[in-house]
Image: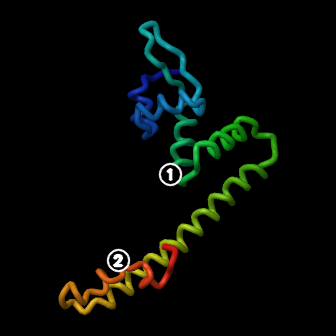
């Protein structure tokens, strides 16, 4: 099995070199073997794990959740209830964020629609930004 350098691992996995080192330092990625010149030497298993971590991060999972998911992945014969619970919790966070963004969108639309395109002293955008009480939604 061919071993590769950290630079090549970064290129193939899409994870930057400092991030790979960070994942090693916090235990998400096992430290690779070292060459005679003390350079890291990565195996295919490292690339698979980096891809898993990168994808989980892209989906917004926190490091602790990823750590748990990796532990579950390492023992495939156990129940997936924990993985389901982690994914459901992330889904709830995403749904809350969507609601917040929709409220923000509505607020911005009202500001823009309310603007008479006249002078700044009559500008609805400026009025709303100056007084949060003018907002339709208190939480955005």
Mark whose residue sits in front, 2 or 1: 2
Q: Position of residue 8 (x, y in %)?
A: 40, 29
The crowd level at tag 1 (other Cα within 10 Å; few <14, some 14-19, many 20+) is few
Quadrant position of the N terminus in the picture: top right
Q: What element carries label 2?
A: helix
Taking the spot 63% from the left edge, 58% from the top edge, the residue there is 90
Kindly identify which numbered label has been placed on residue 129: 2
Say which of 3 and 31 sits in front: 31
Say which of 67 and 48 sits in front: 67
Taking the spot 73% from the left edge, 55% from the top edge, the residue there is 85
Q: Residue furthest left?
A: 119
Above or below 120: residue 13? above
| Residue indicated by mark 1 | 58
Q: Real-space Cα distance between discs 2 and 1?
A: 32 Å
Q: Position of residue 110 (x, y in %)?
A: 38, 87
Q: What element carries label 1?
A: helix
Above or below 112: residue 35? above
Say which of 74 and 120 sits in front: 120
Q: In this view, does 55 lie to the left or right of 18?
A: right
Taking the spot 26% from the left edge, 86% from the top edge, the residue there is 123
């Amino acid at each position: 099995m061919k071993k590769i350098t950290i630079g090549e691992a970064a290129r193939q996995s899409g994870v930057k070199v400092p991030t790979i080192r960070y994942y090693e330092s916090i235990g998400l990625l096992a430290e690779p073997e070292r060459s005679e010149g003390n350079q890291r030497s990565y195996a295919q298993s490292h690339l698979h794990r980096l891809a898993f971590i990168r994808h989980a991060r892209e989906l917004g999972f926190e490091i602790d959740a990823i750590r748990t998911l990796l532990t579950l992945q390492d023992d495939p014969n156990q129940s997936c209830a924990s993985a389901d619970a982690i994914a459901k919790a992330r889904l709830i966070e995403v749904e809350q964020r969507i609601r917040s963004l929709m409220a923000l969108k509505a607020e911005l639309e009202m500001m823009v629609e309310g603007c008479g395109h006249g002078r700044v002293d009559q500008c609805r955008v400026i009025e709303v930004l100056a007084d949060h009480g003018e907002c339709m939604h208190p939480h955005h």
